[in-house]
């Protein structure tokens, strides 16, 4: 690398070029160096025109500090304060997942349907719950959502209409798929 | 020649100058004006606590009554600055406790404030009146208790967005019975439950209380007790806005709100139960500021609420408001100046609300005074940005966060260069810009060419080469703060524009391509810059010079290198021998 500072003017750097990205090899990073801890989302090999035409977004990895939301805001959804009892103020139920070290609490009133609830659970526990079918339950899924109803029985989430579910559900448990056999209607 | 202007007359004139810029200009006229000015400067603002030392400030300005200071770089808000980085206020408090016995105000942002510091403040300054800790950390409720107990003339205690370790809620009870001077109390960041009766008595005996921001633990059914004792309140932050649905609680609350005829600003609203919203409708028409950014209300409730706030100038809200709610906002709130829309589900893979670029376009069309925007969304188009630019040439702050990095214009799949280019071209007074989405070097060309009043620029996952950075550093005449993450910017542009860095407050670059060698070179050549390498992999010396550093923070300073760096920060020195702290 030239000692550009000594020269003062680095004409190459000041040159206004509207060339397509990636056509200037000098500006690429040394990704071959073993010391590079590349948490750059964009590596130099991606600086070509194909990238711009591609429709698919980059892979979803957890990037530190992105999106730029302060930590006290991040918890707005999950950290609903403990408001137990009465019907006006929420339907908080505990959620456990097999293998997870601690429980969570969610407000069933917050969700409109099973789809929203399951998506939220998948996000919260970073697991794959899959799709419900009346005949086969969650057959084949890695994790199966179950709940304890007012009678103390353990039921498969999705069997009863949503409104009935929210009023009868006392707690949720996300079971490992291998242990959930027997809850589906048709096994 | 030969007339002399009496010093006393000049001093009297200077008394009326409050702006730092004006006072700085005055002090450059000649040596005697410099002298006169420095003796009568009462307020000092230090934008970067490491740009100067307490000793230098005290030596130049012996009669200061108010200090305002900022510490960590802005990206510390998003966990990009590791723990223990610095920005300790104690050395300042310690020096000022001796030099400024008449200090009245301390306002800090992003600094580490210990209980020791708070106790020293409370005991050193007999006339202490104002303490504002914005996004600070390092203290506990014990430190607050010292302030409450010892600052007999306290007017303002504002802990906005700070992190306080809650050892006990009893700190509030330390305000003595004869403390009646409070004008502003913001304890919204505190988690612990304070003694409600102590709070009630405090509010009752402070007739000048204008601002009261409660914490989440204060129950809604008790809020009327406070409102009745402070009907003169102008700014209120509620606690949790939920309770059992009971008509007596409701009517009590509604009545209490109706007595507060001066209310201009509302915030809080944690855990909102929609049934209790109408209780506050009576104050809506007078509200100029509304912070609903914790309120998990759905679109219909939000829409109904904001549609009644015809005087609204500032709205902070979650994206539950959706495009339709923003359209209603644009129809109802013609005085709106500032809008911030926060994401309810920032880490969700799929959109969970109907909020798109259209919401922002509507507001830009309907609200002629809109000048400050922070908007989180999942899709954007050049067409929308061009429309917004055309509608609002008066924009001053424009911060757009498209949640997924490097997402292109969703209609054309092109980069968003032309859209942001339109913004900087049209909004000639733009002072702050944050960009996102797919962006090439082209957008930086536009910025360097047009954004002549831009003071702060935030860039992430953007650009193709050093040319991008070069456009910004060489073109943006007013640039003071530049923060960059995950961009392919390297050594060339940085070194070619080294002199520019002395005209700025600071530069932050993380996960870019700046080599250790270039950092050393910069540090050697620019003695009035502190070039700090942050690298948690161990000493940069143990890697080749060509290896990029993890993070780089460069700032101008007359204070020399700092002496309180943690083990993962290295200063690039003039003599290029690295000293480990």
Image (tube, helix red, strand yellow):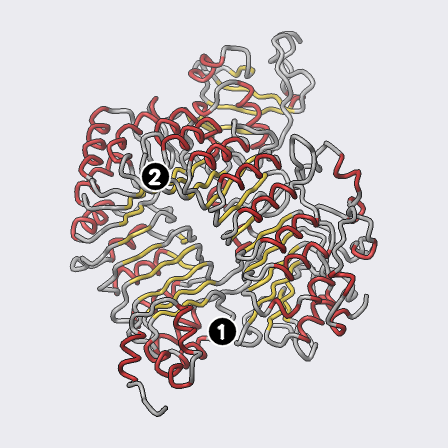
Where does residue B473 sit, x and y in percent of width and height?
A: 64, 61
**Looking at this rendering, what residue extends furthest in the front direction?**
B1
- Residue B305 coordinates in the image, percent (x, y): 34, 30
Q: Which residue is mark 2?
A: B312
Q: Earlier in the sequence, mark 1 or mark 2?
A: 1
- The image quarter in which residue B123 lies: bottom left
Q: Which of the two marks, 1 or 2, is nearer to us in this view?
A: 2
Q: For residue B562, what is the image quadrant?
A: bottom right
Query: In this rendering, would B198 be left or right of B356?
Result: left
Query: Mark 2, chain letter?
Result: B
Q: Nearer the viewer, residue B153 or B208?
A: B208
Q: Pointer 1: what residue? A: B52
**For residue B524, which quarter of the picture?**
bottom right
Relative side of B316 to B100, left or right = right
Give residue A82's position: percent from left, percent from top. Answer: 39, 34
> Looking at the figure, which quarter contains the N terminus of chain A?
bottom right
């Amino acid at each position: 690398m030239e000692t550009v500072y000594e020269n003062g003017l680095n004409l190459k750097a000041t040159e206004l070029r509207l060339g397509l990205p990636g056509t200037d090899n000098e500006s690429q990073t040394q990704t071959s160096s073993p010391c590079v801890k590349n948490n750059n989302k964009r590596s130099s090999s991606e600086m070509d025109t194909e990238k711009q035409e591609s429709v698919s977004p980059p892979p979803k990895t957890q990037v530190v500090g992105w999106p730029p939301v302060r930590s006290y805001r991040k918890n707005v959804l999950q950290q609903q304060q403990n408001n137990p009892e009465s019907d006006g103020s929420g339907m908080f139920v505990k959620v456990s997942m097999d293998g997870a070290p601690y429980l969570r609490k969610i407000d069933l009133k917050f969700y409109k349907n099973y789809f929203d609830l399951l998506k939220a659970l998948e996000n919260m526990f970073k697991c794959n719950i899959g799709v419900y079918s009346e005949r086969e339950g969650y057959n084949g899924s890695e994790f199966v959502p179950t709940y304890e109803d007012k009678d103390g029985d353990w039921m498969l989430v999705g069997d009863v209409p949503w409104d009935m579910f929210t009023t009868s559900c006392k707690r949720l448990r996300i079971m490992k798929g291998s242990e959930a056999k027997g809850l589906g209607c048709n096994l | 020649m030969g007339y002399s202007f009496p010093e006393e007359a000049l001093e009297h004139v200077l008394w009326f100058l409050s702006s730092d810029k004006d006072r700085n200009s005055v002090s450059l006229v000649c040596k005697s004006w410099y002298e006169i000015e420095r003796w009568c400067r009462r307020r000092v603002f230090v934008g970067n606590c490491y740009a100067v030392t307490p000793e230098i400030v005290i030596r130049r300005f012996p009669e200061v009554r108010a200090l305002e200071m900022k510490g960590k770089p802005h990206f510390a808000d998003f966990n990009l600055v590791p723990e223990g980085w610095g920005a300790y206020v104690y050395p300042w408090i310690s020096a000022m406790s001796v030099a400024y016995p008449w200090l009245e105000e301390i306002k800090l942002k992003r600094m580490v404030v210990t209980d020791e510091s708070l106790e020293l403040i409370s005991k050193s300054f007999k006339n202490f009146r104002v303490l504002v800790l914005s996004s600070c950390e390092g203290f506990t409720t014990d430190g607050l208790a010292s302030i409450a107990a010892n600052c007999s003339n306290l007017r303002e205690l504002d802990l906005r967005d700070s992190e306080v370790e809650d050892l006990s809620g009893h700190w509030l009870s330390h305000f003595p019975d004869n403390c009646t001077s409070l004008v502003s109390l913001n304890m919204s960041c505190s988690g612990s439950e304070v003694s409600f009766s102590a709070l009630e008595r405090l509010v009752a005996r402070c007739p000048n209380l204008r601002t009261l921001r409660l914490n989440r633990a204060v129950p809604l059914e008790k809020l009327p007790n406070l409102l009745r004792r402070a009907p003169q309140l102008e700014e209120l932050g509620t606690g949790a806005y939920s309770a059992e649905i009971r008509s007596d609680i409701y009517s009590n609350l509604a009545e209490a709100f109706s007595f507060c005829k001066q209310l201009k600003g509302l915030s809080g609203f944690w855990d909102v139960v929609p049934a209790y919203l109408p209780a506050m409708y009576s104050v809506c028409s007078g509200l100029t500021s509304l912070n609903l950014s914790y309120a998990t209300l759905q679109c219909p409730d939000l829409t109904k609420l904001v549609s009644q706030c015809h005087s609204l100038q500032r709205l902070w809200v979650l994206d539950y408001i959706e495009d339709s709610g923003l359209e209603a906002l644009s129809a109802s709130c013609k005085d709106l100046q500032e809008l911030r829309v926060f994401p309810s589900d920032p880490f969700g893979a799929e959109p969970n609300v109907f909020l798109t670029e259209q919401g922002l376009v509507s507001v830009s069309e309907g609200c002629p005074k809109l000048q400050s925007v922070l908007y989180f969304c999942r899709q954007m188009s050049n067409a929308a940005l061009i429309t917004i630019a055309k509608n609002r040439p008066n924009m001053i702050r424009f911060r757009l966060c498209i949640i997924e990095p490097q997402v292109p214009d969703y209609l054309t799949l092109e980069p968003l260069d032309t859209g942001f280019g339109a913004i900087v071209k049209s909004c000639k007074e733009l002072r702050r810009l944050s960009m996102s989405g797919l962006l090439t070097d082209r957008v930086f060309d536009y910025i360097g060419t047009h954004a002549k009043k831009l003071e702060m620029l935030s860039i992430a996952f953007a650009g193709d080469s050093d040319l991008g950075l070069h456009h910004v550093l060489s073109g943006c005449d007013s640039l003071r703060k530049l923060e960059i993450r995950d961009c392919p910017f390297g050594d060339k542009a940085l070194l070619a524009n080294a002199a520019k860095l002395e005209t700025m407050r600071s530069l932050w670059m993380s996960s870019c391509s700046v080599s250790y060698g270039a950092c050393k070179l910069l540090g050697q050549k620019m003695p009035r810059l502190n070039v700090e390498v942050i690298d948690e992999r161990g000493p940069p010396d143990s890697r080749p010079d060509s290896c990029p550093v993890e993070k780089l923070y460069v700032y101008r300073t007359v204070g020399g290198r700092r002496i309180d760096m943690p083990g993962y920060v290295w200063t690039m020195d003039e003599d290029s021998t690295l000293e480990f702290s």
